[in-house]
Amino acid sequence: MTMDTKCLVVDANILLSAVFGVRVRALLHEYADTIGFYTPDVCFEEAQKHIPAISLQKKVNPLAAFEFLKRMNRLVEPVSINLYEEHEATARRRIAARDIKDWPVVATALLVQRSIWTEDQDFFGTGIATWTTNNMEVFLHDS
């Protein structure tokens, strides 16, 4: 993991938005050379779990969606638990009132000391800046 001056931690819902949508995918491609995008390894696993249902709903070939998610690690670097687990206790305390399962995202943000890109309001109040896709261009432009 190389520490970029400009980087963001990406939540699983953003990975899924990139797989099934256009806007997030375009932003990741456009800024991949200037912004480091990181996600805890478990976010890729979580995204995989949701692909079958979303594929069915959107009438998309799930194999193509799985393949695209697999290639996403070229744009979004998975961070091993070996790196972020040192922040687990702090992350769990910060997210406990919302969704404790999201602690790896908080821990990764603490590790790289950067903001989180998410559509999930559970990260609000954790002491870490969060950005939604609607505001992402402001963040990326100002970075």
Image: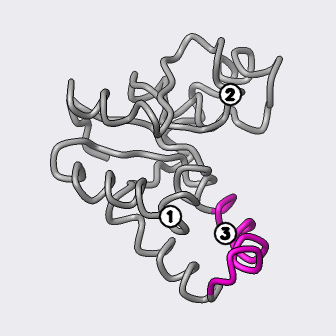
Residue shown at 77%/38% (left/top)?
A: 101
Relative to 138, is 96 on the left or the right? right
Can residue 32 be seen from the camera position used here? Answer: yes
Relative to 98, is 110 on the left or the right? left
Residue type at numbered disc 2: Gln
Residue shown at 58%/60% (left/top)?
A: 16
Give x and y (percent) for residue 4: 22, 36
Name the residue nearer the viewer: 46 or 132. Answer: 132
What SS does tag 1 mark? loop
Residue type at numbered disc 3: Gln
Label placed on residue 108: none
- Looking at the rendered image, the disc whose residue lies closer to the viewer, 3 or 2, is 2
- The residue indicated by pointer 3 is 48
Q: Is residue 140 magenta?
A: no
Give x and y (percent) for residue 93: 74, 15
Label placed on residue 121: 2
Q: Mark 3 or mark 1: name the one nearer the start of the chain.
A: 1
Magenta residues, dominant SS class? helix
- Looking at the rendered image, the disc whose residue lies closer to the viewer, 1 or 2, is 1
Name the residue nearer the viewer: 22 or 14. Answer: 22
- The residue indicated by pointer 1 is 21
Q: CA distance from mark 1 to mark 2?
A: 20 Å
- Residue span colored magenta: 45-60
Q: Is residue 110 positioned above or below 105 on the image?
A: above
Q: In which quadrant is the C terminus drawn?
A: top left
